[in-house]
Image (cartoon, rainbow, N blue to C red):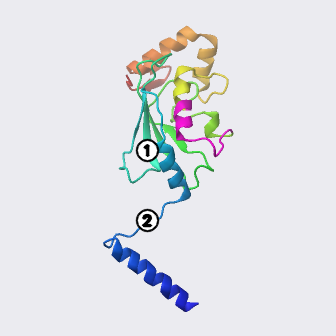
Amino acid sequence: MIKLFKVKEKQRELAENASAGAPVKKQSAGELRLHKDISELNLPKSCAIQFPNGNDDLMNFEVTIRPDDGYYLGGKFLFSFNVSPIYPHEAPKVKCKTKVYHPNIDLEGNVCLNILREDWKPVLNINTVIYGLYHLFTEPNYEDPLNQDAAAVLRDSPKLFESNVRRAMAGGYVGQSFFPRCM
């Protein structure tokens, strides 16, 4: 048994020396799948992906969405993605970093999107999530809200909702909440 450990230790030492002293980082299954997902991204021109921690940290990235239709036309919304090492068996954690008046995004940036919760399946991918987020801006859903006030206004008075969205995106107050400019 001891000899086995010594052989493994010797192999590891040889591998480290072969790579000029840099330890070889073993990728998790989640990192491998995420690398595949990112290499196959087919985003609309209104979406972009950035890696603020550098390309070596694929598990944490940001997506910018600039809706080209609907109430949020002209806005710019930033989302952070945190992907678990057990991805795709667990959905990525997504937060909206832009404060937005939206029925499906609360003021803390939590996102209500079914595929990020109960409808997540390992066959889904990052491309699907980004399209889902984009869809929230082109067709907000008042039936499954996180921001109850915005959902009620959208349901009862779409013109007032549109006015509130424009005011929030331009940088202003809607009710008691201030929204920084995001256009």
Q: Nearer the viewer, residue 98 or 130?
A: 130
In the rendered image, residue 143 lying in the magenta stretch gets the answer: no
Q: Quadrant of residue 125?
A: top right
Per the rendering, the mark at residue 9 is: none
Q: Quadrant of residue 12?
A: bottom left
* Circle 2: residue type: Lys
Q: Which element type, helix, strand or loop, lies under badge 2? A: loop
| Badge 1: residue crowd in 10 Å (few <14, some 14–19, many ≥20) | some
Q: Is residue 83 visible?
A: no
Q: Is residue 93 visible?
A: yes
Residue span colored magenta: 119-132
> Which image quarter holds the N terminus?
bottom right
Q: How far from the left and from the top, in percent, is residue 56?
A: 39, 54
In the rendered image, residue 121 lying in the magenta stretch gets the answer: yes
Q: How far from the left and from the top, in percent, is residue 147?
A: 58, 27
Q: How far from the left and from the top, in percent, is residue 115?
A: 63, 37
Q: Nearer the viewer, residue 97 or 180?
A: 97
Q: Which residue is mark 2?
A: 25
Residue lying at 59% horizontally and 10% vertically, measured from the top left: 157
Q: How far from the left and from the top, in percent, is residue 144?
A: 66, 27
As drawn, 139 above or below 163: below
